[in-house]
Amino acid sequence: MHDCTFESERQIVTTFEEVRDGVVEIARRAKRSITILTPDLEPGVYDTEEFLDAVKQLVLAKRIARMRVLISEPGRTVRNGNRLIALGRRLNTNIDFRNLHEDYRSTLRGAFIIADDQAVLYRTDSRGYDGIMGSFEPSNAKRHLDAFEQPWAASVYRYDTPLERI
């Protein structure tokens, strides 16, 4: 009998391309859920064919699969547009978008994507690309998910927000 331990494949990301590719990799690892904190759905990151395919594969394969997206700067999303919004409208029982409540905008400056409660790509400053990605990071994922829950609950979707007009 051999020991079945998991180790994270942790790596530093510093460029737009590394973040884009890392986001796709994290999304492909998801079996139940994807959780995202993003300033504006970051054009070129969350609207690539590869990312959208990973999301579709997850939510169409499992009825219980869920994706939650918390957007801290929804006005920028309106100006830029994003194909993930269109996908979310088609699969609205599995994909939820919320605009970050104003009370949290000064405290939540980072950006992340989490697959299930394991894989994480986290950037401390959502305006930059410096971050860390780990494939098996349950304690790190839990820390970010715990920090996500209260702002998510406070950020109930409102139909008069800019996101609705996309």
Image (tube, rainbow, N blue to C red):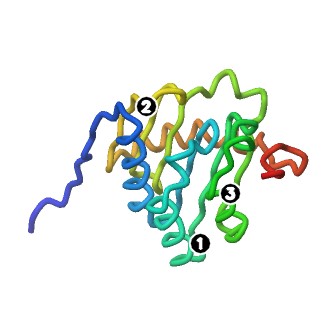
**Of circles 1 and 2, which is in front?**
2
Determine the residue located farthest toward the right in the rendered image: 160
Q: For the residues marked 1 and 3, what is the alpha-carbon distance in whole angstroms?
A: 20 Å
> Circle 2 sits in a helix, a strand or a loop, which is it?
loop
Label 2 sits on residue = 129
Q: Nearer the viewer, residue 46 or 29?
A: 46
Q: At 56% from the left edge and 76% from the top edge, which residue is drawn?
A: 60
Taking 111 as reference, is 49 above or below it?
A: below
Residues marked 1 and 2 touching at CB (< 8 Å): no
Q: At 49% from the left edge and 56% from the top edge, which residue is drawn?
A: 48
Label 1 sits on residue = 64
Q: Nearer the viewer, residue 128 or 8?
A: 128
Q: Is residue 27 left or right of residue 67?
A: left
Label 1 CA crowd tier, 10 Å (few <14, some 14–19, many 20+): few
Q: Measured from the top left, where is residue 1 in percent x and y? A: 9, 68
| Disc 3 residue type (three-letter) | Ile
Res. 97 visible in picture: yes
**Of circles 1 and 3, which is in front?**
3
Q: Is residue 66 left or right of residue 9?
A: right
Label 2 CA crowd tier, 10 Å (few <14, some 14–19, many 20+): many
Residue 35: give its label. Answer: none
Taking 74 as reference, is 5 above or below it?
A: below
> Circle 3 sits in a helix, a strand or a loop, which is it?
helix
| Disc 1 residue type (three-letter) | Ile
| Disc 2 residue type (three-letter) | Tyr
